[in-house]
Image (cartoon, helix red, strand yellow):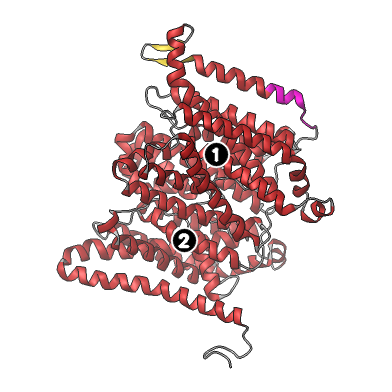
Amino acid sequence: MPAAGLPAAMPPHAALRAVLRKGLLTCLLAVPALALAGLAITGTSDPLILTYSLLPRILAALVAGALLGLGGAVFQRVFNNPLAEPSLLGITGGAALCMAATLVLAPVLWSQGYQIVALAGAGLALAAVLAIAWGPHLNSQKLVLAGVMVNLLCNAAYSLLVLFNHDFLSNLLTWQAGSLQQNGWAAPLRLTVLALLAIIPLWLLERPLRLLALGDAGASSLGLPVRMVKLLMLGLVSCLAACVTAEFGQIGLIGLAAPALARAIRQRANPGLASSALTGALLLLTADQCMRLLTPFAGDLPVGAAAGLFAGPLLILLARRAAGSVPLTFQLQAPQRKAGARLLLLLGLALTLAFAAALVMGRVPGGWSLALDGRELARIWQWRLPPLLGSASAGLCLALAGLLLQRLLRNPLASPDLLGIGHGAGLALALALVILPAASAPAKLAVTLTGAGLAMLAVTLLALRSRFDPARMLLIGAGIASTANALLVLVMAGGGQRGAALLGWFSGITSSTSLPVAVAAALTGCACLAGSLLLSRRVDLVALGEPAAISLGVSVRRTRIIGLTLAALATAAGTLVTGPVSFIGILVPHLVTRLGFRGTASASIACGLTGALLMTLAEWASQTLAWPWPLSPGLLAALLGGPYFLWLLRR
């Protein structure tokens, strides 16, 4: 007997999916309705708050969410890539960096309108990404990787600006997290007028955008100027995303989740720009109003972080159920010659010399100092050795973890950051530090390993159905990272003084690293390197593909389980020192490939040495450039290694 309202031929799993879609749509519409009912009650008691704060906040959420959803839909359809959206491609990061830089260096530009400053920053970021990925068809995989790098560079530079000018830019910290609090109608109305002005050009470009679904060759055969249309669409939606960033800060993942949710609800590959815009508006309104209702219990939380609590699980669900696949096969080309033991010896010698120089040479109250006598060496042992050893060990661990992930999953974008493993480890450690601040180094490592292992297990289990499809794995990883990062912000916000103490660790500052923690990270990194060497032959065969590995007698599942466990352990040790965000895991494996290390055994050693060398140099620079204020070596590593990596991508 068929269920009421469903076709008789509908199979049970299809009926279940239909019920889930209807339930999802009902929740998306019901939560804002309940929030509006709460606003009516609030307005009865205080009409001024309703008129000048709550109603403008609703309009801001609706318009900003619509523009972000619209931008994500255009980016994804232009590049035929579910990972493309303004914040991931560096647009919002560039706008934020340009606003902070001009506020410090040229505040007179703000008198001309901060929206223009944001547009300039977004334009520069988009130009950089397009210049790197430009080719016959605007390579989609290279574009995503270039966008990730540009976004990391912009965020690193922004964080350094805030650290150097904390008193001057302290108000930008709340803005950067994405806040929709309003004290009038000016900002929401400005954004509404901008959205209305963009309707006509977007409507005119809707048909050309649909033709792009036929592919560049098919659209060109019908007389469509493909590159011109792509550039027009990208320029228009980048301006809209930059204006949202200028008014309300960085609100991530809405542009990524809204088009995916619209596709799931409408069951169409291209549901239309209006559907994505409406879904983005409702999604952001839901996140913002839920956070507003939780304000009496958890304090005022920025919607940019809170949106991750809603968008993260949604991305995971949609990534598992999405049809089709977007191949991510891009790899940096290795040189023709193969690197050998001589280059490994040079890397080892460079690491030894850099580590020794960083130990004995540094800045003191009287200027530069070269520690040679016993008293100065004792001070080095106490103050310089722990953070230096910890940073070098973290570089080894994170670089090795990135190499194992990229080779086992055959995904050039796999890294502890992008797959959410570092965020899972960071969340577990943050909870432990708030609850048990006096925990020993082994206990902290065990807790961090638990968080990394759970995140890795979640990514692996959720990706099994798609046979580790790269695009779906990145969506799942983005969802886990978003959820864990939002929870981490909540932990820091609700942890009182202990939560505030986590801010330094969260930003990657290593000056407070203890010697037991540094030694634990070093021993863990060496153990993971030894495990990688023992597993290297099987990893090489798995990288050839599952059929080839199975035909040669390799158990692909067992190899992946062991390798991913090593990656989780290495990520936990690195996160224990440098916090949940790093740059080494995605940068170093590609640099090592470029140097000519092809086999997993030699590449593992090279990754460990290169990662440790980069973080040693970054740690020394972080302790000397702005002395006596410490900087984050992870941020400095991003600023030093990022441009070189982008140059390699362009080549």
**Which of marks 1 and 2 precedes in the sequence?**
2
Residue 304: x and y in percent read 39, 54
Q: Is residue 369 left or right of residue 610?
A: left
267 or 388, nearer to the observer: 388
| Dominant secondary-structure state across the stretch colored magenta | helix
Label 1 sits on a secondary structure element that is loop
Magenta residues span 338-346
**Residue behind mark 2:** 311
Image location (x, y in percent) of residue 545: 77, 53
Placement of 343 over or under 16, stated as above or below: above
For badge 2, the amino acid type reads Ala
Q: Which residue is mark 1?
A: 583
Quarter of the image with the C terminus is top right
Q: Is residue 314 above or below residue 248?
A: below
Query: Outermost residue, left direction?
Result: 45
| Residue occupying the point 71% across, 51% down | 558
Which numbered dot is residue 306? none
- Packing grade of label 1 (10 A; few <14, some 14-19, many >=20) is many
